[in-house]
Image: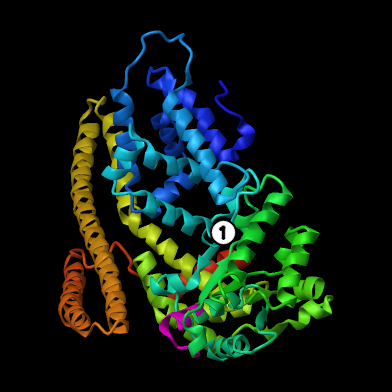
Amino acid sequence: MQPTNPNQFTEKAWAAIARTPDVVKAAQQQQIEPEHLLKALLEEEGLAASIFSKAGINIQKLRDRTDEFINRQPKISSSTSGVYLGKNLDVLLDRAEKERKSFGDDFISIEHILLPYCKDDRFGKPLYQEMGLDEAKLRNVIQQVRGNQKVTDQSPENKYEALTKYGRDLTELAREGKLDPVIGRNNEIRSIIQILSRRTNNNPLLIGESGVGKTAIIQGLAQRIFSGDVPEYLKEHKLIALDMGGLIAGAKYRGEFEERLKAVLKEVTESSGQFILFIDEIHTVFSAGATCINNLFRSMILQEMLHCIGTTTLDKYREYIEKDAPFERRFQKIYIDQPNVKDTISILRGLRPQYELHHGVNISDAALVAAVTLSSRYIIDRFLPDKAINLIDEAAAKLKMEITSQPEAIDDINHQVIQLEIECLALKKETDPKSLNCLNNLYKELDDLKEKQIILKNQWETEKCFTVNIYSLKENIDLVNMQIDQAEREFNLNKAAELKYGKLVDLQRQLEIAKLTLENAKTSGIALLRQEVTAEDIVEIVDRWVGIHDSKSVKS
């Protein structure tokens, strides 16, 4: 069934139209009408769903209302009857063509199809009214999504909101408290701010080995922009991290990757300097893209149309950037070396609360020191602070796994109980006095073991319950602290005081009670669950990583 010419539509718009016969057949109907096309558009989490979501529409409710309308329409009993284009859908597609012309586009896209529903008295208009959506609001949302993009090919959706799709707003992540604190990198961050403040050649390029903390420094800059601890002209800027993997993924041909990157660069340049583009491993722009993309990116940098921060390693810098002298001069190099042992310990102490909260365990200071010193001594193919952070992360993950699994003491008793039960079954067949006496002794030993098994299981369940409660309270305390910081930044002092001296104090009191209750719940005097990562845990991880099977040699 070909109700119209597919060459008039974008690929995704035509794909939705092509699915409508299946929607009609599933509903046991014959005419393809606007409701069937809207259902097909909503079945795919694409541009239509994105536009409705930005307009504040509940997508599931919209689907439900569409299904209800479809189910009220007449049905046919014959499964062999064909389907055909209904008059109402024909009118809607004609109006979509008019919308295409008014936008100055070359193809009918999904947004052109959504607008005519505002004039569809039979289905679309009442539905939009019920959802609180009018034509002016819908056009405004579509304009926000499209930006200045024109539909000049059959895959325009990949270029809409390119920065949102292929970039992460680090300043927004800082606002949401999703970035780790950056410790001991003040000089490097100040250098970046100083370069960004220059009139020309104001593109910082961080050069250093993988794992020395280049990306963390950029996150520290994002946090400073959010907190306002930057020069006045930088306070309204947004730091966008470009996702090169997302740009490349799913591109069916090299030209599609080029179109995506062009759309990103176009949004950045048209923002009047609002966006600062961060490209981690900036050499991938040259190694993954075609020559025309290299030339486009290079041209925008040379003409100072693009405000950019890049990171790369020294080897890749020499291979891809240093050879191009005019391009290389547009970047101001900042060499990032790995921190020393003392500074790395400070970094880990600053990160400790985040890792404790994530894993629901405590991390001793001795474990932090061991992670830094042992990784510096034995793990020679990686760099600080990354390798030390990885040690802490893995040790905490291992302890968390032990908390959620059955303790070794209970596991041993379970095996003993099974063994005794097997012996009892074997002796039941015997009738001589000696065997019967042995059986009685085994029953008594089995009863004692089962009693101990019950006690330990109850203790484990109790400890696990209180451990989960403590973890939940710590999460709530962290959330309240973030709310307090936000209230203070907004000068909402009443709310900040209410949270700080009310809710926070109450949660801290509950946490202390939960910790005390957990200690009292350890009836055997020996805790079944460990709560703290120790230096021995770090030694065990290093022992496994570097292949030194004698742990004493690692400790020495």
Using the image, determine if residue 391 lies above or below residue 243. Answer: below
Q: Is residue 502 left or right of residue 413?
A: left
Which residue is disc 1 drawn over?
A: 162
Q: Main secondary structure of the magenta part?
A: helix
- Quadrant occupied by the N terminus: top right
Amino acid at circle 1: Ala
At horizontal 44% and vertical 70% (from top left) the residue drawn is: 173
Nearer the observer, 522 or 27: 27
**Residues drawn in magenta:** 222-231
224 within the magenta span: yes
Q: Tag 1: Cα neighbours inside 10 Å, few (<14), some, or many (≥20)?
A: many
Residue 524: image x %, image y %?
20, 64
Q: In the rendered structure, does residue 362 fall within the stretch colored magenta?
A: no
Question: Which quadrant of the structure image shows residue 477?
Answer: bottom left
In the rendered image of this protein, does residue 104 appear above or below residue 389? above
In the rendered view, would you say 288 is above or below 256? below
